[in-house]
Image: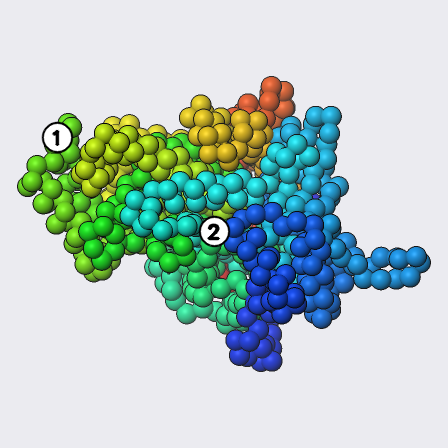
Amino acid sequence: MTAISRFKALEREYGHKPVHVDHSHDKNLTFYACNVFDRQKMAKFLPESVFKQVQRTMDEGKRIDRELADHVANAMKEWALQLGVTHYTHWFQPLTDQSAEKHDSFFTLDHGMPVESFDGKVLAQQEPDASSFPNGGIRNTFEARGYTAWDCTSPAFVIGSTLCIPTIFVSYTGEALDYKTPLLRALNAIDKQATAVCRYFLPDTKKVIATLGWEQEYFLIDEALFDARPDLISCGRTLMGHNSAKNQQLDDHYFGSIPERVVEFMADLEVECHKLGIPVRTRHNEVAPGQFECAPIFEEANLAVDHNMLLMDLMMKIARRHNFRILLHEKPFAEVNGSGKHNNWSLAADGRVNLLSPGKDHDSNLMFLTFLVNVIKAVYNHQDLLRASIMTAGNEHRLGASEAPPAIVSVFLGAHLSRILALLKEKTADGKILDAAAKRSINLDIEQIPEILLDNTDRNRTSPFAFTGNRFEFRAVGSSANCACPLIVLNTIVAGQLEQFKNELDAALSSGANRDETILKILGNYTSEFYPILFEGNNYSDDWKAEAARRGLSNVTSCPESISAYTLDSTVKLFEAQKVLSERELSARQDIYAENYHKKIHIESLVIANLALNHIIPTAIRYQNLLAENYHNTKGLGFDDLIENRLDTIKTISKLILVIKTDVANMSEARNKASHSADNLQKALEYHNSVKPFLSSIRKSIDALEMIIDDEMWPLPKYREMLFCH
Ligand code: ADP
Ligand code: MG
């Protein structure tokens, strides 16, 4: 592990000035989505009748046949060639942390003559030699092939000289090997179930889509300092580093003025995002020094997921132009705020009506309450699964600690909605018949929802799942996550819940019950059931942990334990019923996440051992020698009593060195033991329980040494140097 020295890095850092990228030629908004093969481009490059046919097929969610695909491929190629494109790739999202691509050239030989070729066949399907992507055993069977297949619901785009075609990635048996396949299935499920429920209120409803507006948090660090930190290079987070004297105590970074180097980066990023049709709009400093956020206008969920994946990719590339590196890790710096990716989620009927937005009259508010209550019920019933969908080795640092959204899933509603649900619960308790007075009080309150919410600015920044007026904000998602992962779960659990609600309602209606009364009654029953999950207080407090335990809410802070929720009976039953993932696909996923977990801890443990033995201990010994030399040279000069504490320091250093060496040896033994585990989940548990604790204990000793040793000798950039951009 070679890294540049700290002082060289600092020198390089000071040389880094703001990099201005001239985008003046793109000044007006005409470049928005210029690199996207969207409907307008399709209309321009396809014959009119073919264009109409393609639109119809896409809108109805049907398959595009080979002949149509040929037309689209040809139009895509013509458009792309104008932009100087030479290659194309199927762009997909395997179960790793990144998107994947394999580039092929348009160039081919036709009877020895060079031609540019791209047809419906290669547009629609490819067989990338992608055998080393994680598959959880699905591809170990006799046929190991994996296919990518065109997802025509997300438009193709151009990056550099490559045409990128969004695709799904499945095994030859049709089993999902990626995030996108189950996401599309989950979006279908929510469409089907939500449309059915929506029709009680809006009988003409044709389609319900899920919407997603993500907020991406990230850290920026100077590339020279990054290069001098082997832990950042290999693990994405600092495995050691004493806290800087000043970090976020004064909250002076949050929404503060953005440093010029960063402004230039952000401006550059925005232009590149807009060219790809990613509608980013806000940018600001976040709570921690060096931390920032960007957020787009919300979009249909599948497209929003693609756009977030693209954004993460773009950020990395563009940061380099500005001599920065992006840290997407959930907890790059200990004792400094971590990074999340808030997923703002809602449902929209026929692209117009937000189903989580209160309406203007009784009926639309009853619809609003119906969806609101069903979402909360789904979250309550599947709290363990929802947590599993956001648990990773990185996010474990947030969810397990008491600063970011905790591992306890709770729902925040704000005072007024809480009151309405309390009323609903009370008036329908114990199978109470809604008498005239009860009906009046509930109805009155339903009528008043919109006015009340208008001036209801309640926000709870500690809640993992908060209602924010017309959407839910799932705040516990990790900054490096693929949003598809939580969205698969969220949409599926809500779809299952809506189906159950419809069944209950239909059963009552068929025996002649009154519609509105029955709906209120069912919603009241649900509310009584999920009531313990509603929480308006501070989610970070220890009191809440105790209170949540009393309420019977689960609190799982370990990633390996949490992901076992993927194979709970309730999960399998639901996912199979909604046709999102089969039992085999679910257990493959669990296996992959477990493997990812233990591999990450494994790498971290190797890196910290290496740094401890090869960087830190040698430095400590050198400094110790210096002290010893000084002690000998000064002894006998007449003030021996004053230099005695030199010996104490030498002793402290020796002790710390010994503790580190012992910890490293024991950690290595724990790793060996863990490697004999029966399977990936077991191994992940072993790594969590017996290897991970050494990471903190070794760090503690190293951080103590950092406070003792001469600053001139310390080999790694310090927190105060990394956290503040100059
Ligand atoms: P805050 O910081 O208070 O959470 P922001 O304005 O930063 O608020 O973020 C709001 C996010 O919510 C934006 O990304 C926006 O696109 C998204 N959003 C707004 N309405 C919807 C909706 N109906 N569905 C999904 N996302 C939405
Ligand atoms: Mg937010």
Three-letter amino acid code at disc 2?
A: Ala
Where is residue 594 drawn, in percent x and y?
Answer: 56, 31
Q: Tag 2, which secondary structure? A: helix
Instruction: Answer with left or right where residue 313 lies relative to residue 338.
Output: right
Q: Position of residue 362 (x, y in %)?
A: 19, 51
For label 2, being within 8 Å of ligand 1 is answered no
Residue at point 55% right, 70% down?
A: 32
**Lateral position of residue 172 relative to residue 722, left or right:** right
Q: Position of residue 110 (x, y in %)?
A: 89, 57
Ligand 1 - quadrant of the structure image: bottom left
What's the residue at 69%, 50% (across, down)?
A: 66
Query: Which residue lies under the disc numbered 2?
Result: 301
Of callouts 1 and 2, the N-terminal one: 2
Q: Nearer the viewer, mark 1 or mark 2?
A: 1
Q: Which mark is residue 432?
A: 1
Front one among 66 and 478: 66
Q: Which residue is drawn at the image coordinates 8% and 36% (left, top)?
A: 435
270 and 40: which one is in front? 40
Q: Amino acid at mark 1?
A: Lys
Question: Disc 1, ligand 1: is the CB inside 8 Å?
Answer: no
Q: Badge 1 local density, few (<14 within 10 Å), some, or many (20+)? A: few
Kindly report the distance in space between the C-alpha atoms of the residues bearing marks 1 and 2. Answer: 40 Å
